[in-house]
């Protein structure tokens, strides 16, 4: 089930995946989004980051703690790009990772997950 994430009429979307803290109210409630993954449809990473960034801003507002980083990934399945939003400042990793170099990609994914888990 895909769950939309909304801050207001302009900042809303349905991420392909959300990693969040488990809510005490059950799995139908979103609590503390930590990581947003968005597909770069038709390899359009610019549009993918636009959607991901809107969802990251919404996640930051849901968390009500802008000092907690919220991480974002945009991927077309082959190329993976990483970024984070902290206190309304977006930072994107300059280099992307491809499935041709799985060890590096898995290292980047592990790093992002460890950073997100550490902020709970």
Image: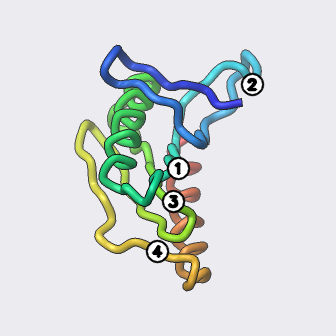
Q: Nearer the viewer, residue 85 or 42?
A: 42
Residue in the image at 23% along x and 44% along y: 89
Residue in the image at 52% along x and 31% along y: 14
Q: How far apart are labels 2 and 3 at the CA level? A: 23 Å
Whichever of callouts 1 and 4 sits on the residue coming sooner in the sequence is 4
**Residue 105 on image: x %, y %:** 55, 74
Q: Which residue is mark 4?
A: 97
**Residue 16 on image: x %, y %:** 58, 42
Furthest-left residue in view?
Answer: 89
Q: Which mark is residue 82?
A: none
Q: How far apart are labels 4 and 3 at the CA level? A: 13 Å
Asked if residue 32 lies left or right of residue 63, the reply is right
- Which one is closest to the eye, mark 1 or mark 4? 4
Whichever of callouts 2 and 3 sits on the residue coming sooner in the sequence is 2
- Which one is closest to the eye, mark 2 or mark 1? 2
Q: Which residue is mark 2?
A: 27
**Residue 83 on image: x %, y %:** 37, 55
Whichever of callouts 2 and 1 sits on the residue coming sooner in the sequence is 2
Quarter of the image with the C terminus in it: top right
Whichever of callouts 4 and 3 sits on the residue coming sooner in the sequence is 4
Q: Nearer the viewer, residue 97 or 26?
A: 97
Q: How far apart are labels 3 and 1 at the CA level? A: 6 Å
Q: Which residue is mark 1?
A: 116
Find out whether the residues at labels 3 and 1 contact each other: C-beta distance under 8 Å: yes
Q: Is residue 95 above or below residue 8?
A: below
Is label 4 in a helix, a strand or a loop? strand
Q: Nearer the viewer, residue 29 or 50?
A: 50
**Residue 117 on image: x %, y %:** 58, 49
Q: Which residue is mark 3?
A: 112
């Amino acid at each position: 089930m895909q769950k939309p994430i909304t801050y207001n009429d302009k900042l809303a979307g349905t991420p392909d995946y959300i990693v969040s803290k488990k809510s005490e109210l059950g799995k139908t409630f979103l609590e503390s989004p930590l990581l947003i993954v968005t597909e770069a449809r038709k390899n359009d990473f610019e549009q993918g980051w636009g959607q991901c960034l809107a969802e990251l801003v919404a996640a930051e507002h849901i968390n009500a703690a802008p000092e907690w980083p919220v991480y974002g990934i945009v991927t077309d399945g082959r190329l993976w790009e990483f970024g984070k939003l902290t206190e309304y400042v977006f930072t994107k990793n300059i280099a992307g990772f491809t499935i041709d170099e799985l060890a590096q990609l898995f290292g980047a994914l592990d790093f992002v997950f460890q950073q997100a888990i550490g902020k709970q």
